[in-house]
Amino acid sequence: MHIVVVGLSHKTAPVEIREKLAIPESRMGEALGRLCSYQGVREGVLLSTCNRVEVYAVVDEIESGYGRIQDFLADAHLSLSSEQLTPHLYWHEGDRALGHLFRVASSLDSMIIGESQILGQIKEAFEVALTNKSTGIILNKVMKKAISVAKRVRTETKISEMAVSVSYAAVELAKKIFSDLTEKTVLLVGAGEMAKLAARHFIASGVRHVRVTTRSPQHAVELANRFGGTAVPFEEFREDMATADIVLVSTGAAHYLVSEDDVQHSVKQRMNRPMFLIDISVPRNIDPAVRHVDNAFLFDIDDLKTRVERNRGERLNEAEKAERMVMDEVGVVRQWLQSLEVTPTIVALRARIDEIKRSEIDKTLGRLAHLSSTERELVEAMASSIVNKLIHNTMVTLKAEVNSSEGAAFVEAARRFFGLGDSSGPNVNGSSSSESKTCHPSHDGIQDAEEVTPRTGSEIPRH
Amino acid sequence: MAAMFFVVTLALYFAATVSFLIYLLWPSEVLANISLGMTATGFAAHTIALGAGMVGVTDISSPGFHEALSFFSWMLILVFLAVEFRHHLHVLGSFIVPLALLSLVSAAALPEAVPTLTPVFGTLWVHVTLSMLGTVGFAVAFVAGVMYLIQDGLLKSKRFNVLYSKLPALDFLDNLNQRSIVTGFPLLTLGIITGALSAEFSRGSYVNWNPEQVWALATWVFYFVVLTGRLTVGWRAKRAAYLTIIGFAGVILTLIGVVLKSHGPVS
């Protein structure tokens, strides 16, 4: 059994490919079902965001597992062949797969390092997987661990301040154009996380008028309600731009949505009152030629990043700190995973039983000093026979279930029933479950996951 | 006594100019406060010099260009200190104080002149004061325009340097520009009217179409158009900045014309 990840992200694939592979929420259940129907794929979680599409899975064999997952990805979109995908994909297994997942969850692999949306997306992906019963003992634990690692990174490093500082930079820039933001109007085009974060910063800085437009009118209304603003039909937002002092654009469109002429027209309608345009989209949605328009000030994500470059050294340190945390946690999970292997468990069980038997025999024989050597042998034989019979079924079941989908659960159960040392197991369990319960009382899905281990455990024959 | 305080003022404005210019490129609040202190002290000395000068002159109804320029410089600093007091905008000093210094140096270079006009309303001060107040308004608009163009250029080229962080928001500068012209324009109008009346009294005609009068009228028409354009068709922001810079250049030319007319080869 091996943990693997196959996927692509903003670092390896252009948006056209990412868009094609993205799995819409409505088809997630079907996709998970299809993933798990591949032979040798035991557990699976699908992570599909605008910046990455990744498959986390537990497979029997690494090489064939990679191949099946790649087929799965290619099958999702008919116009893409497996070969076309290959140059954009990355494959990791074992520690590297775990490290990758933890880094993704901690937002160390994000386009904007430290942004918080990815953690929510990971939780969502996990919940969908739980609902569709595509995860088992291993991914349940690993995903929960990823969530707790991400939280640890967020609380113990300043990495999340980086994303905040980018949107803060947008507000700072705006203050060099408008001395008083309270009477200004912000137009939010699209619903990218950074744009929303920036919009929230503008509201916190006093902006009272917010207008929202997205391709889906319903989404626009929802967002507008959240920001206490007004929804604008997407087809009309260019005409609406003249009412906006600050325009935040962040959509998934692969082309320019706002042209030089659009902005020229708006500035004219505004009687030359300055306009502040921020393009947080990748690829860009506002034609860079807009910078030639007088009284229009266009900044893209790179400009904002440059504004916060000053504390770069400090932030690199924070990223290193986060990386170290990720590596520590990978070590913890690795230990736990090793404990799930059958042979060492059987050896440990044997040793534990022998140890108990030996100590009990010694205790008893110490009090029965008058026994002859034959009698002593008889006592020892009886003890051996009792323990062997007691653990016989356990041993047989463990060996038989080695290759079943619940093998790991049986091993875990056996280790717990017989108190087989491994401190990392209960530790992983304890920390993540208590955290999930306290931090997410409303996330039923994750609480369900807490019960996975005991429930599976109880299915073991009670002999 | 007036001469002594005048020299002290010159020295202090010079020092303040130097330190304000250094402040422009060097982020230090201490330096800003030192510059500000020197300007304020210089302003006090200037006030005494002007007051003493008025006491010393027997015929206070006949100010020369020396007094006018000195008064112009004093008004500029007064406006700067007022804006500084309200908005704590140190960087404005880096632009206004050098201008005030320049004006004061010009005043020092000019000999005391005998006015050629018979005063109207008993004194020529009314005409000079009103014209100079109007000019102060245009000078502040000019400074705001220059600062606007610099900040606009820095934002457009995305050069976030010390200057960028010190210059105020664009709309603040545009507002300052508008307010200065809105205040300066009526004052200049009154200045021109009283000037024309003085001319009528002394020469018997309101206008004799000499070059500086033509320039003055051209300046007035220019600012009238700038102001109307701003209020009606949105000539604000960058365009307003450019126009007020051009306009102030016109004002300076008029002044030079007037001075040359009285002292130079023109007369």
Image (cartoon, coloured by chain):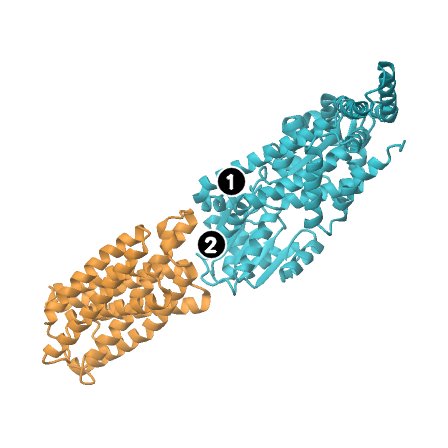
Chain colours: A cyan, B orange
Whether labels 2 and 1 belong to a single chain: the reply is yes
Q: Is residue A78 visible?
A: yes
Q: Whole-Å distance between the Cαs marked 2 and 1? A: 23 Å
Residue of label 1:
A318
Q: Is residue A47 visible?
A: no
The tag on residue A172 is 2
Is disc 1 placed on a helix, strand or loop? helix
Q: Residue furthest front?
A: A370
Rendered location of residue B79, percent (x, y):
30, 69
- Residue A207 sits above or below residue A400 on the image: below
Q: Residue furthest bottom?
A: B121
- Residue B232 sits above or below residue A242 on the image: below
Front position in the image: A363 or B157: A363
Using a 10 Å C-alpha cutoff, classify the residue at mark 1 as few (fewer than 14 neighbours), some (14 to 19) or many (20 or more): some
Specify the quadrant that holds the C terminus of chain A: top right
Rendered location of residue A251, percent (x, y):
62, 47
Specify the quadrant that holds the N terminus of chain A: top right
Front position in the image: A397 or B57: A397
Is disc 2 placed on a helix, strand or loop? helix
- Amino acid at circle 2: Glu
Among the 4 quarters of the image, the one containing residue B186? bottom left
Locate residue A127 relative to residue A186 in the image: left or right.
Answer: right
- Amino acid at circle 1: Glu
